[in-house]
C-alpha cells in the first residue's frame, strides 16, 4: 500500500495541517474541501494510521499525524530539491563545483563568496582545495577543479585563460627581536643574504629549479603558510607575507615591516587571477563564483587574456 503514496497526497496533508482546516487547504491548493478530505482519507488508508481527528469543528492532528508531518515535509522537500537539481543539470549546471585557491588569497573574501554561493546554489556541492605556487594549477590540469585562483602562474602544457580578480599586497616582515628589525629601513639584498629566509615551498614539480623572491643564502623551506607565520613571529627568520595576514601583528608589535629595497620600499603587489583551460571554461556555477570573487576584490573586472 505504501507504494501507492503520492507527493500530491503528502502536500495535501501538509497544507491541511498547516492551515488548520480542509477548506483552507482547499483554497490554498485550488481544490474543493471534499477533494482535500478524500485525498487525506486515501493517504490514511495507504499509511494505515489516522492522521486527523474529525469529531470537532476542525480537524485536529492525531499523535501519529504529528509524528508523520515532519517526515512528509522531508519527503516533499527532497522531491523539490531533486526537481531543482534536475532542472539545473538539464540547463548545464555543474553537478559539483570544485575549485582550487592560492593560499595567499584573502580568506575573508573567499568565505564571503562561499556563503553567497551556498545561497545561490543550495543544491550544488562545493569542493575547495587550498594550495601554493605550482600546486594550485595541478588540479586544474588533471581535471579535478573547474578553475583556480592563483597569484603566480607557472608554465602550463595547455593554453590557459586568465581573468584578473584582485591584488594581494605582499610585505617583508620579521620579529621585533630579529636583528633585521633594528635596521628595518632601506634593507639591501646583501644584508638579507646573511639572514635565514623563511620560504613557502612548492609541493608540485611544475616550478622545479625556479625560485620566487628568494634572496638569502640561508633558507628554511615550509609547506604551510601558517607554520611560516608562526616561525616569523618566533624570530626564526624573515620572509614575505600577505599584508592581510600580518597587519594585526604589525599593529600589535608582534611583527615589524621591513623596508626591503628590492621590494620597492615596504611592499609588492601580487595579482590574483581566475585560471582555467581555454577549451573548457567553467559552467554556470563556476562562472557565478568567478564574478562573485571579482566583486569582492580590490581590482574590478578586467579583460580576459590568454597566456
Image (cartoon, rainbow, N blue to C red):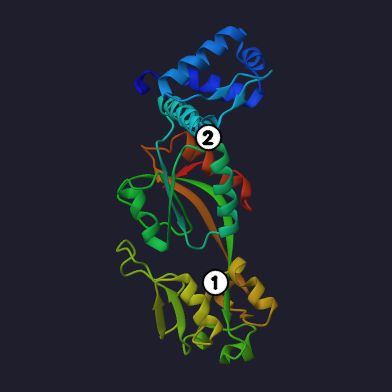
Task: In this rendered view, identify the residue nearer to me: 42 or 187.
Answer: 42
Residue at image coords 60%, 22%: 15
Task: Specify the label residue 104 is tagged with.
Answer: none
Residue at image coords 55%, 49%: 165
In the image, residue 201 lies at what x, y percent? 39, 71
In the image, residue 304 lies at what x, y percent? 50, 41
Q: Is residue 34 left or right of residue 123?
A: right
In the picture of the structure, the residue carrying the numbered disc 1 is 241
Answer with the quarter of the image where residue 203 lies. bottom left
Q: Residues within 10 Å of mark 1 (few under 14, many from 20)?
A: many
Task: In this rendered view, identify the residue nearer to me: 15 or 241.
Answer: 15
Q: Is residue 182 left or right of residue 67?
A: right
Which of the two labelled residues, at mark 2 and mark 1, occupies the earlier sequence position?
Answer: 2
Task: In this rendered view, identify the residue nearer to me: 9 or 289.
Answer: 9
Residue at image coords 53%, 31%: 69
In the image, residue 214 lies at what x, y percent? 44, 76
User: Mark 2 or 1, which is nearer the eye?
Assistant: 2
**Looking at the rendering, in which quadrant would you find the N terminus?**
top left
Q: Residues within 10 Å of mark 2 (few under 14, many from 20)?
A: few
In the picture of the structure, the residue carrying the numbered disc 2 is 70
In the image, residue 106 lies at what x, y percent? 57, 59
Q: Secondary structure at mark 1?
A: strand
Residue 303 in view, yes or no: no
Check the image and report above or below for 214 versus 4. below
Amino acid at each position: 500500500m505504501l507504494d501507492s503514496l503520492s507527493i500530491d497526497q503528502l502536500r495535501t496533508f501538509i497544507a491541511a495541517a498547516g492551515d488548520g482546516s480542509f477548506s483552507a487547504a482547499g483554497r490554498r491548493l485550488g481544490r474543493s474541501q471534499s477533494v482535500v478530505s478524500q485525498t487525506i482519507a486515501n493517504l490514511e488508508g495507504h499509511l494505515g494510521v489516522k492522521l486527523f481527528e474529525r469529531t470537532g469543528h476542525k480537524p485536529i492532528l492525531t499523535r501519529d499525524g504529528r509524528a508523520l508531518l515532519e517526515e512528509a515535509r522531508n519527503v516533499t522537500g527532497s522531491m523539490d530539491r531533486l526537481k531543482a537539481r534536475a532542472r539545473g543539470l538539464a540547463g548545464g549546471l555543474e553537478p559539483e563545483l570544485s575549485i582550487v585557491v592560492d593560499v595567499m588569497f584573502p580568506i575573508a573574501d573567499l568565505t564571503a563568496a562561499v556563503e553567497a554561493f551556498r545561497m545561490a546554489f543550495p543544491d550544488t556541492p562545493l569542493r575547495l582545495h587550498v594550495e601554493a605556487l605550482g600546486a594550485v594549477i595541478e588540479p586544474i590540469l588533471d581535471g579535478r577543479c573547474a578553475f583556480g585562483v592563483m597569484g603566480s602562474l607557472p608554465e602550463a602544457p595547455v593554453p590557459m585563460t586568465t581573468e584578473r580578480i584582485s591584488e594581494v599586497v605582499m610585505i617583508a616582515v620579521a620579529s621585533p627581536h630579529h636583528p633585521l628589525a633594528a635596521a628595518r629601513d632601506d634593507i639591501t639584498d646583501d644584508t638579507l643574504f646573511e639572514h635565514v629566509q623563511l620560504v613557502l615551498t612548492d609541493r608540485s614539480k611544475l616550478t622545479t629549479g625556479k625560485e620566487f623572491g628568494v634572496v638569502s643564502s640561508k633558507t628554511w623551506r615550509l609547506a604551510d603558510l601558517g607554520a611560516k607565520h608562526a616561525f616569523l613571529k618566533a624570530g626564526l627568520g624573515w620572509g614575505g607575507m600577505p599584508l592581510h595576514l600580518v597587519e594585526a601583528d604589525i599593529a600589535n608589535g608582534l611583527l615589524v615591516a621591513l623596508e626591503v629595497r628590492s621590494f620597492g620600499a615596504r611592499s609588492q603587489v601580487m595579482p590574483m587571477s581566475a585560471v582555467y583551460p581555454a577549451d573548457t571554461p567553467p559552467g554556470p556555477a563556476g562562472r557565478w563564483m568567478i564574478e562573485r570573487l571579482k566583486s569582492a576584490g580590490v581590482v574590478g573586472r578586467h579583460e580576459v587574456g590568454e597566456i
